[in-house]
Image: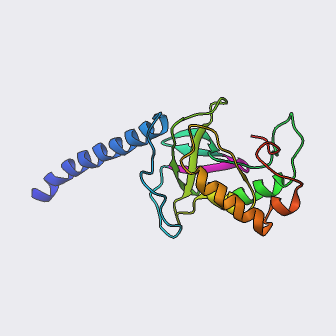
């Protein structure tokens, strides 16, 4: 009797927990001021909880993810990669390489943790976020700048990691990594958003 009587209670607890997790993820996706990841960015080696799954990489700084059953287009905050998909603009120097690198980092099915800043969406309706790969804690936005696939793009008020991105980009420029070696005078003005 005791073991049989516990199962309905456990089922109710599991259902309530699932609803609470789903609600928290939906609130996180729609919140205008909440940051998913409080405090400092964890070390690269740390595995993180995820709140989204990568569906596909659109280009170097834009990714489609699934959050709580909904598809969202994410624009990576604080960096800018050369354009590859805007039909109004030619493919820019190092754009295909940046897109391929982001695809390498974020293959479909990759669990990720989205960190928000102050402003939730851009003028195109894309969710603005910093992306951390859940399996190893890799800070994707920072990695793109560090390896010369992106330049810093500081747009107020979403500047929580602007200093880190600038320092990473400066290191890539000094080492002539990526677009800093391949492209004439790359900067955030010559790289499309």
- Work out which residue is located at the far left of the displayed protein and give it: 1
Counting from the top left corner in percent of width and height, residue 23 is at 38, 38
State left or right for residue 153 relative to residue 48. Answer: right
On whether residue 122 falls in the magenta region, the answer is no
Q: Is residue 147 visible?
A: no
The residues colored magenta run 52-62
Q: Residue at x 52, y 49 (%)?
A: 114
State left or right for residue 187 relative to residue 138. Answer: right
Q: Main secondary structure of the magenta part?
A: strand
Q: How is the image coloured?
A: rainbow
Q: How many marks?
A: 0
State left or right for residue 92 relative to residue 109. Answer: right
Counting from the top left corner in percent of width and height, residue 156 is at 59, 37
Q: Nearer the viewer, residue 83 or 189?
A: 189
85 vs 174: above or below: above
Counting from the top left corner in percent of width and height, residue 113 is at 51, 53
Counting from the top left corner in percent of width and height, residue 147 is at 72, 64
Q: Quadrant of residue 174?
A: bottom right
On whether residue 53 falls in the magenta region, the answer is yes
Q: Residue at x 75, y 49 (%)?
A: 81
State left or right for residue 33 relative to residue 73. Answer: left
57 vs 136: above or below: above
Quarter of the image with the C terminus in it = top right
Q: Is residue 58 visible?
A: yes
């Amino acid at each position: 009797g005791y073991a049989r009587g516990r199962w309905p209670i456990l089922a109710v607890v599991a259902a309530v927990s699932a609803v609470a997790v789903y609600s928290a993820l939906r609130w996180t996706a729609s919140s205008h001021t909440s940051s998913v990841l409080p405090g400092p960015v964890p070390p690269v080696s740390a595995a993180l909880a995820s709140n989204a799954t990568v569906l596909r990489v659109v280009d170097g700084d834009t990714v489609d993810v699934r959050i709580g059953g909904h598809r969202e287009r994410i624009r990576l905050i604080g960096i800018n990669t050369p354009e590859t998909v805007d039909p109004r603009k030619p493919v820019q120097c190092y754009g295909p390489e940046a897109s391929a690198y982001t695809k390498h980092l974020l293959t479909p099915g990759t669990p990720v943790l989205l960190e928000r800043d102050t402003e939730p969406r851009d003028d195109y309706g894309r969710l603005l976020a910093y992306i951390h790969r859940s399996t190893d804690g890799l800070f994707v936005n920072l990695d793109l700048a560090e390896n010369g696939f992106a330049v810093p793009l500081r747009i107020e008020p979403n500047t929580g990691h602007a200093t880190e991105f600038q320092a990473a980009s400066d290191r890539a420029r000094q080492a002539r990594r990526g677009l800093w070696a391949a492209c004439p005078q790359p900067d955030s003005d010559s790289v499309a958003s």
